[in-house]
Image: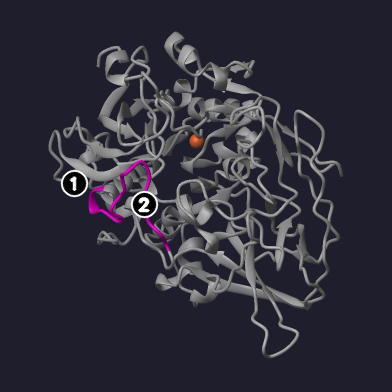
């Protein structure tokens, strides 16, 4: 959700009532043994060694981009840019990579798997190239209301995913090969996820629908840039195009081509793999299938997870019923109904359209934001059913994350007392107004945010029990992963006059406590 306009709405008046970069823990199992309620066995998946073994392999820091030149007045880099044929791919499948270079230049694709790797943050998996570059056409804007920019480029490379590439987030670093020694090289990324179907402890769901919703490639074509308004219904975006430069709350040219993974999600990936958790990865399109979630003990929504197909909602609902623990380490989650549709070439789940919103809106929200909501006719269930709280007006802002229930098991060994705060951890979007009708829902942290530094709102972090001794935790902030680690090249965000401080042992401890409980055998 993008708005800085919260005229006249003060959440205080509207409410009904109302864990150093490493914590010395060798593994999730150790933390589990320290929990007291309910009795935790410390049981650990037999698959956990996959990620631990992978992270013992040599890392490489040169996954980072060095040289990027963004086109003047645009969000693309026509010198070299590309996209992949799928959001996620599994071992044995073939991924096609489409690359454009203008002027035409030979190039290489260096493929990295993102993780910890002794602090390097990635492992170099392979180099594709040198490959012949060609200038590829920028598609015209499609008809109203979609205004779709959908590329149909010639493939530049075909990558068959080897059986020994573990599930993970993979970056392809595109680098031009200069025609003369006096010319500079230029770079950008492509990004894809390798998924699997094995039983695993933790499912890390990338928020790639939301990356695409905010992608302005090539000129200014995101779901927020329709001439009829920032939240016009029926606007669509395609995954068949490169990710442009991230610009929403900070200018980050060195993430170009990688969506928003490096900004909001990578610190959690780096930390989970550092701590040896048995993690597997998927895209929003993978979580259409309930079985993709129910094979895991914990499902994690990460960072900015706003755009959901209704089938994703149903899958999360089914996962809770099946006993999966849900951790919303995210904000503004499950807010816009965004059905998938196939590409012009027939590839499924390659377009998302803004169709509606989740949950009932209050009359005052409808009144204050009718420009935003009036066209969103596709009504969907209340997202509080699967989160515990919801996106509330004002949608964005910054604040401190303040403990209100220090006796809860999730705060064990944090030393947090009632009223203790983690500075700047809430931002730039959050959840509030919890579902007090739900049995067992507890508010564990709450406080104020200020949109634009002036308009006060309230965030609420919650936890509620599932039917099989599982739980649903809502951290209520996009910035939660910022408190877990600071990988190489990471830039801390700054928004609404507020910022998080980076790794905090309390955020790390709370996350360990939650995961340990989630991974405990029941
Ligand atoms: Fe948002």
Quadrant in the rendering for residue 435: top left
Residue at left 30%, top 56%?
Answer: 503
Q: Is residue 23 visible?
A: yes
Residue at left 53%, top 64%?
Answer: 254
Relative to 245, 40 lies left or right: left
Residue topped by disc 1: 414
Residue 117, position as x, y percentages in the image: 45, 70
Q: Which residues are magenta?
A: 490-506
Q: Is residue 37 above or below residue 366?
A: below
Quadrant in the rendering for residue 354: top right
Is 415 part of what is drawn in magenta? no
Residue 46, position as x, y percentages in the image: 47, 55
Between tags 1 and 2, which lies in front? 2
Q: Farthest residue in the front direction?
A: 73
Q: Which mark is residue 482?
A: 2
SS category of the residue bearing label 1: loop
Residue at left 36%, top 61%?
Answer: 486
Q: Quadrant of the C terminus?
A: top left
Mark 1 Cα-neighbour bin, 10 Å: few <14, some 14–19, many ≥20 = some
């Amino acid at each position: 959700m993008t708005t800085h306009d919260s005229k006249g709405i003060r959440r205080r008046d509207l409410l009904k009532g109302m864990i150093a970069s490493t914590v010395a823990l060798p593994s999730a199992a150790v933390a589990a043994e320290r929990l007291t309620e309910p009795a935790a066995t410390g049981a650990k998946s037999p698959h956990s060694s996959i990620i631990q073994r992978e992270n013992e392999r040599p890392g490489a820091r040169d996954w980072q981009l060095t040289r990027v030149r963004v086109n003047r007045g645009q969000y693309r880099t026509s010198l070299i840019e590309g996209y992949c044929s799928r959001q996620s791919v599994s071992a044995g499948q073939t991924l096609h990579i489409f690359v454009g270079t203008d002027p035409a230049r030979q190039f290489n694709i260096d493929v990295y798997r993102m993780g910890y790797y002794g602090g390097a943050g990635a492992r170099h998996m392979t180099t594709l190239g040198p490959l012949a570059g060609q200038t590829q056409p920028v598609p015209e804007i499609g008809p109203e209301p979609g205004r779709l920019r959908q590329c149909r480029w010639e493939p530049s490379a075909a990558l068959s995913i080897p059986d020994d590439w573990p599930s993970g987030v993979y970056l392809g670093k595109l680098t031009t090969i200069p025609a003369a020694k006096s010319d500079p090289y230029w770079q950008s990324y492509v990004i894809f996820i390798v998924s699997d179907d094995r039983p695993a402890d933790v499912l890390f769901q990338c928020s790639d629908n939301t990356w695409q919703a905010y992608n302005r490639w090539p000129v200014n074509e995101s779901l927020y840039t329709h001439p009829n308004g920032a939240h016009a219904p029926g606007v669509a975006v395609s995954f068949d195009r490169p990710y442009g430069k991230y610009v929403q709350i900070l200018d980050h040219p060195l993430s170009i081509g990688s969506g928003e993974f490096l900004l909001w999600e990578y610190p959690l990936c780096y930390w989970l793999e550092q701590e040896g958790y048995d993690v597997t990865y998927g895209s929003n399109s993978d979580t259409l299938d309930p079985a993709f979630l129910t094979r895991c003990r914990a499902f994690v929504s990460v960072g900015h997870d706003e755009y959901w197909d209704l089938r994703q909602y149903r899958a999360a609902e089914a996962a809770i019923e099946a006993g999966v623990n849900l951790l919303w380490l995210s904000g503004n989650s499950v807010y816009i109904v965004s059905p998938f549709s196939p590409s012009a070439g027939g590839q499924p789940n390659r377009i998302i359209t803004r169709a509606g919103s989740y949950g009932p809106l209050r009359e005052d929200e409808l009144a204050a934001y009718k420009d935003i909501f009036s066209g969103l006719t596709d009504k969907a269930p209340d997202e509080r059913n699967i989160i515990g709280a919801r996106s509330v007006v004002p949608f964005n802002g910054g604040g401190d994350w303040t403990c209100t229930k220090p006796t809860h098991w999730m705060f064990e060994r944090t030393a947090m007392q009632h009223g203790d705060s983690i500075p700047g951890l809430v931002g730039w979007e959050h959840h509030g107004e919890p579902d007090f009708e739900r049995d067992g829902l507890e508010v564990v942290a709450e406080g104020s945010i200020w949109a634009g530094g002036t308009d006060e709102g309230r965030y609420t972090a919650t936890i509620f029990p599932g039917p099989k001794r599982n739980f649903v935790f809502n951290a209520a902030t996009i910035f939660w992963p910022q408190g877990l680690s600071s990988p190489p090249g990471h830039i801390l965000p700054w928004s609404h006059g507020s910022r998080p401080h980076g790794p905090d042992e309390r955020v790390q401890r709370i996350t360990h406590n939650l995961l340990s409980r989630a991974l405990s055998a029941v």
